[in-house]
Image (cartoon, rainbow, N blue to C red):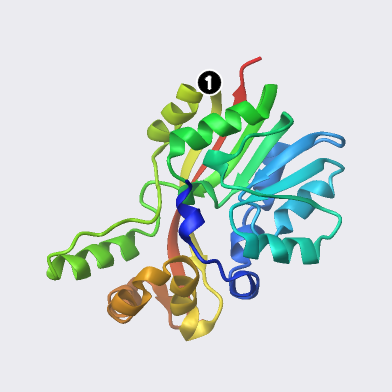
């Protein structure tokens, strides 16, 4: 079971306040370079914006997501699309795809090796995988604050995400049978919508289990580095892992 199966996603909040998730992935589509007529699987498609952009290239795209709430919104916005409600580690493809695309999803999905195995099985020989997700050091300020706050209570932090480095995730893909052809770990300081409420909105969406116990203290700790007083906007210290691989023919 993927860890995202246990998350209750707020699809409306996602579209209204967190559009940066998919707007920042325009050049990820360019890295995939979809061609007209190709069959592409969008893993963790969410509410379907990038699935639709992939389809606009002439590719035949199927969106896969473990959240029925997200998929309901995708179906409403893009009724001509093809959508599958499934958890990636449990997904058994009934066709093999030319390519797999995934943005901001794989850090939610465990176990990572089973997820990689499923993606490998879903590709044709020579098929491509292009993905971007949270990498080592992602949202470090939040994790450090949570560890400090829970540590004061004698508790440990149960991380809801998987943030690997390049070597770790390349090994996961290679163990599945992929050949990794490109990998980049980079910082992306990301402005949040909502003004002063930006950090609270982010935690309501992505870390609701910590919001009540961590938010107020975290805002105090993070304000000197993550709050831009001039714009009145919070920023998140994202660190992304972008990777491209192919299934050996």
Q: Nearer the viewer, residue 219 or 184?
A: 219
Q: How many marks?
A: 1
Circle 1 Cα neighbour tier, 10 Å, few/some/many (<14 / 14–19 / ≥20): some
Image quarter hosting the C terminus: top right
Where is residue 128, by image quadrant? top right
Residue 205 image offset from top left, x and y in percent: 50, 70
Q: Residue at x 47, y 51 (%)?
A: 108
Image vertical order of residue 117 relative to residue 203, above or below: above
Image vertical order of residue 140 relative to residue 97, above or below: below
Q: Nearer the viewer, residue 8 or 119?
A: 8
Q: Look at the image and tell me whether residue 226 can be seen.
A: yes
Q: Residue at x 12, y 65 (%)?
A: 154
Under circle 1, the secondary element is loop
Is 169 left, or right, of 45 in this rendering?
A: left
Q: Residue at x 51, y 64 (%)?
A: 190
Residue 117 image offset from top left, x and y in percent: 53, 29
Return the residue at label 1. Answer: 177
């Amino acid at each position: 079971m993927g860890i995202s199966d246990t998350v209750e996603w707020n699809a409306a909040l996602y579209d209204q306040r967190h559009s940066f998730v998919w707007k920042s992935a325009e050049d990820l589509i360019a890295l995939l370079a979809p061609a007209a007529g190709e069959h592409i699987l969008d893993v963790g498609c969410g509410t379907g914006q990038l699935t639709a952009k992939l389809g606009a290239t002439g590719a035949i795209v199927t969106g896969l997501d473990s959240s029925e709430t997200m998929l309901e919104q995708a179906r409403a916005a893009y009724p001509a699309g093809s959508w599958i409600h499934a958890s990636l580690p449990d997904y058994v493809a009934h066709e093999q795809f030319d390519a797999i695309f995934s943005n901001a999803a794989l850090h939610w999905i465990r176990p990572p090796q089973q997820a990689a195995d499923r993606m490998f099985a879903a590709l044709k020989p020579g098929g491509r995988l292009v993905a971007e997700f949270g990498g080592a050091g992602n949202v470090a300020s939040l994790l450090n604050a949570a560890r400090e706050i829970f540590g004061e209570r004698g508790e440990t932090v149960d991380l809801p995400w998987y943030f690997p480095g390049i070597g770790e995730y390349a090994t996961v893909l290679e163990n599945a049978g992929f050949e990794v052809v490109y990998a980049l770990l980079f910082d992306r300081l990301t402005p949040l919508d909502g003004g002063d409420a930006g950090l609270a909105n982010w935690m309501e969406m992505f870390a609701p289990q910590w919001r009540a116990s961590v938010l107020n203290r975290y805002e105090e700790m993070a304000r000197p580095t993550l709050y831009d007083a001039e714009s009145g906007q919070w920023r998140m210290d994202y660190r992304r892992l972008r990777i491209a691989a192919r299934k050996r023919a």
